[in-house]
Amino acid sequence: MRFYADLPGRRTAQLLSDMGMLCWVGAWAWVGRQVHDSTLALAAPGRQLQDAGTGLSGRMSDAASAVDDVPLVGDKLRVPFNGAAGVGGNLHDAGSSLVTSVERLALLLGWVTALVPILVLGIVWALLRSRFIRRASAAQRFIDSAADLDLFALRAMAHQPMRKLAVISDDPTGAWRRGDTSTIRALALLELKDTGLRPPPQD
């Protein structure tokens, strides 16, 4: 399987493309992390509410325990303190709920921010790279000697633009039929350039 072109210019472009894709992934992963952390900062009020609720609940519970020992009225005095402790518990639960919601939102926004641009460019990059790999790998099997250029010359006449064929010969088909080696090689080079392969040495 051929992952990179033989031609230096195209191989360099492919290597730069791969490095660029890695940088793109790294950059958007960093941006996604920043979005996650920035969103997570919105959970600060929820944590403060948790702390306030825990503190209120603890103080009221301590107060309820302290007045419980008061003769005759201890049970009655304990009731409002227990109620206040319950309010503290509710505050803590509300703060926990807010923190959980913000954490989920931060996680979602972070992943979406990173994945959307990575996938958009990544799919295009993967399609182009896989297309080259398929074409180059398939073509490589047919290039063992100069005699194999005949096939690529024929493909060039079928696929290459007319203006490119006209530069090589006024009658490329006739030259191919006559077995004109220089014209066949020039035609084959057009096709091989598109696949990124180097032609075999001339016999």
Image (cartoon, rainbow, N blue to C red):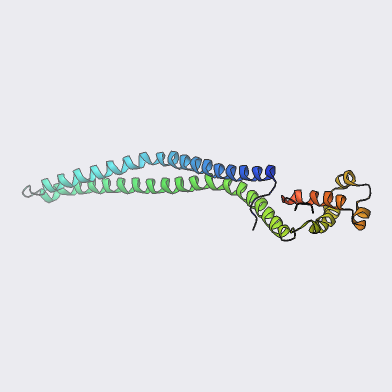
Of residues 59 and 174, the one nearer the viewer is: 174
Of residues 10 and 40, the one nearer the viewer is: 10
* Residue drawn 69% across the image and 53% down it: 132
* Residue drawn 15% across the image and 45% down it: 62
Instruction: Give left or right: position of 184 versus 62.
Output: right
Position of the C terminus, as image quadrant, is: bottom right
Of residues 80 and 106, the one nearer the viewer is: 106
Q: Position of residue 10 (x, y in %)?
A: 69, 44
Q: Position of residue 124 (x, y in %)?
A: 65, 49
Position of the N terminus, as image quadrant, is: bottom right
Of residues 91 and 17, the one nearer the viewer is: 17
Instruction: Give left or right: position of 155 versus 81.
Output: right
Instruction: Give left or right: position of 185 versus 25.
Output: right
Q: Is residue 12 above or below residue 145?
A: above
Q: Position of residue 97 (x, y in %)?
A: 37, 49
Q: How many marks?
A: 0
Instruction: Give left or right: position of 153 versus 144.
Output: right
Q: Position of residue 175 (x, y in %)?
A: 92, 53
| Residue farthest along the left direction in this orientation | 71
| Residue farthest along the front direction in this orientation | 203
